[in-house]
Image (tube, grey):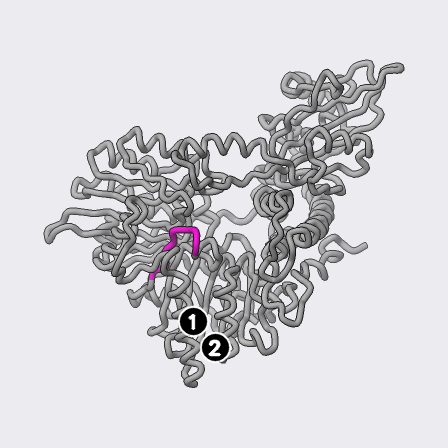
Amino acid sequence: MESASEALAPELSAPTTLAAPQPDARYFNRELSWLAFNRLVLEEACNPKHPLLERVRFLSISANNLDEFFMVRVAGLKAHQALGVEEFSPEGMTVAQQLTAISAEADRLVTSQHEVWAELQALLDKANMRVVGMEPLDPEAEAWLDLHFREQIFPVLTPQAIDPAHPFPFIPNKGLSLIFELKNGRNTVRELIMAPATLPRFIRIPGDTGRYIALETLISRKTDYLFPKYQVLRGGAFRIIRDSDIEVEEEAEDLVRFFRTAIKRRRRGRVVRLELEPNMPEGLVGMVQEGLDAKTAIISDTRGFLGMNDLSQLVDEDRPDLKFVPFNPRFPERIREHAGDCFAAIKEKDILVHHPYESFEVVVAFIQQAAADPDVVAIKQTLYRAGKQSAIIRALIDAAEAGKSVTAVVELKARFDEEQNLVWANALERAGVQVIYGFIDWKTHAKVSMVVRREEKGFRTYCHFGTGNYHPLTALIYTDVSYFTANAQIGRDVAKLFNYITGYLEPRNLKQLVISPTQMRPELIKLIDAEIAAAKARKPSGIWAKLNSLVDPAIIDKLYEASKAGVSIDLVIRGICCLRPGVAGLSDNIYVKSIVGRFLEHARLWCFANGNELPNAEAKVYISSADWMPRNFDRRIEYMLPIGNPTVHAQLLDQVMVANLIDNEQSWRLNSDGTYSRLHPKAGHEFNLHDYFMSNPSLSGRGQSLKKGRRVPKLRFQRGR
């Protein structure tokens, strides 16, 4: 009998056709492209090269991704549909057509998730881990469950009758509930039980083997205790996803007050998705739909387990044999060589730090040193996502309390982090930090900090640029780069950027920095035009770019123009890609791949040949906080920064970018029909960029480039193809 991995192999190798190709179709649909990417995440749950619990983690990530997709993207489309908005997506689909296609593809994805979970359950059982169901257990386990339910679960549950005297209760987003139809003699009643979010979804049964039981399963096993003298006729579980997006109103005069109200309102957003257990009786389904006012919600009849995002709880089991070998990031050598003095190291030479292979603690140390240094007079910092326990926030508070001038740009519109950012803003303001909330219409997404320090020859500005957030936990699993510099021109540009955010003073005469929403798209088009001109003049040309998403039609069309002119274009797009590669006469010279592996590829890195074959020392290399999407170009404060330092230039181009292009163990090629195909390297030619950088974490610039390096002698540089 074939396994789920084998049965799904054709589908997972080619997850979805994004949109019915038309003769003039230039774009893939954004939403279907995202679903195609999420199927790649699910495929990693089928990858036998990963330890078993890591495969469970990938399955939970795939499910959590899908939840957020419905909470935001589908919710937006449903809102447009409810308002009667008729508009076409760039590839020509109506709102209704998109919702129909999304619903069908999401159902296929959920079906695949259940098939993968069935296979993983069998493997867990062999590894002495098990999620039990309704089957009888040994007497000792049954006795423990009975006692645990009576003492730890039952007091928290609140069964509610559903009848005219007891209206249907409010159920929160991602809420899991059970509904039962019960009989006592001639009386029939319906009871609803919400699974409390305060209780863990999985309960570990004591013993040497890792046996777990889901909360809703335990409730179903104990209905005789819950409903004495009643017979359960039928029942089932259901789960809901609510609209969780927050749209900022232009007339909002007080952003803090607006977001406090909006967060409360979001918790009661309309139901956009209703997930049902198999064989839920129609009468109960109708009652649930009516009670939730969910008649327009997308209904998903699942094949079993609801809310697979909670499977991540199983990964906490103490089984190192079923997980990745722990990796401890290395603190950058350059800082260590200067006895931990960040300013001395940066003043001597610009520094590039490659996360998570090199520790994010260097960024924390930079801000902490600034807070403690009596010669530091000012600190300015953007904060998009900082996490719940942030040493950077603590350092900014310490700096303000020490009398330094501290400015923090706290982005309240950071989706799903709004509430935490309000908490940080209050704490910072109480300490005397000047807290700025940025623009009403635009998000401040740039990750930048600057420190002004008094030195012998006057004030010197030290800057940090990140491609990721100032978040200590995501920095352990996201691949990003941090760039530290004391370049005076860059320092002046960053000061102008902060003045723009804090005082709406539009920056003029920027020497290095390029920002959105005013400059970035035109600058990118200018760079692509230069490659087009080089190709037409029969000079070397080329574009390499590493992004999370590529959506912007103007940039896509310009890349098509470059391809037609003969420019070789290699794109590493982790997630959404609306560009259609490899189409004859349109995008013959464009190659697109996605990398999905142990770490989440997150860095934005762009390279332009500039008259020479890539890679070369004269190429134009940029780091950025932005993806190539309309929102990043038009509705966000973002930066792109050219890298002039020769050492950092070589580190980014010859090591980071080349490693991404030649990876062939966790890479998928995007085909012209919208399907993805996994790369299969020949024996002896394997290259895994995550393994490589874990073994060689320091981008010191002291070694040769990957292309010419001795560490990969069998590997020919060929785009990982």
**Residue 488: percent from left, percent from top:** 21, 58
Q: Secondary structure at mark 2?
A: loop
Quick check: is 175 in the magenta stretch? no
Q: Secondary structure at mark 1?
A: helix
Tell me which residue sits at (61%, 49%) in the image: 85
Cα–Cα gap, marks 1 and 2: 9 Å
- Looking at the image, residue 668 sits to the left or right of residue 465; the answer is right
- Verify CB contact (< 8 Å) between mark 1 and mark 2: yes
- Looking at the image, residue 493 sits to the left or right of residue 552; the answer is left
* Res 613 → quadrant: bottom left
Which of the two marks, 1 or 2, is nearer to us in this view?
1
* Res 198 → quadrant: top right
**Residue 580: percent from left, percent from top:** 59, 67
State the residue lying farthest toward the bottom.
538
Q: Quadrant of the N terminus?
A: bottom right
**Nearer to us in this view, 83 or 319:** 83
Tell me which residue sits at (78%, 19%) in the image: 224
* Res 595 → quadrant: bottom right
Mark identifier at residue 40? none
Camera sees residue 116? no
Tell me which residue sits at (24%, 47%) in the image: 451
Tell me which residue sits at (75%, 33%) in the image: 133
404 above or below 341?
Answer: above
Mark identifier at residue 567? 2
Q: Check disc 1 and report the residue beneath it.
A: 528
State the residue lying farthest toward the right.
186
**What is the crowding at mark 2: few (fewer than 14 residues within 10 Å), some, or many (at least 20)?**
many
Quick check: is 637 in the magenta stretch? yes
**Nearer to us in this view, 538 or 632:** 632
The magenta-colored residue range is 634-641
The amino acid pointed to by label 2 is Val
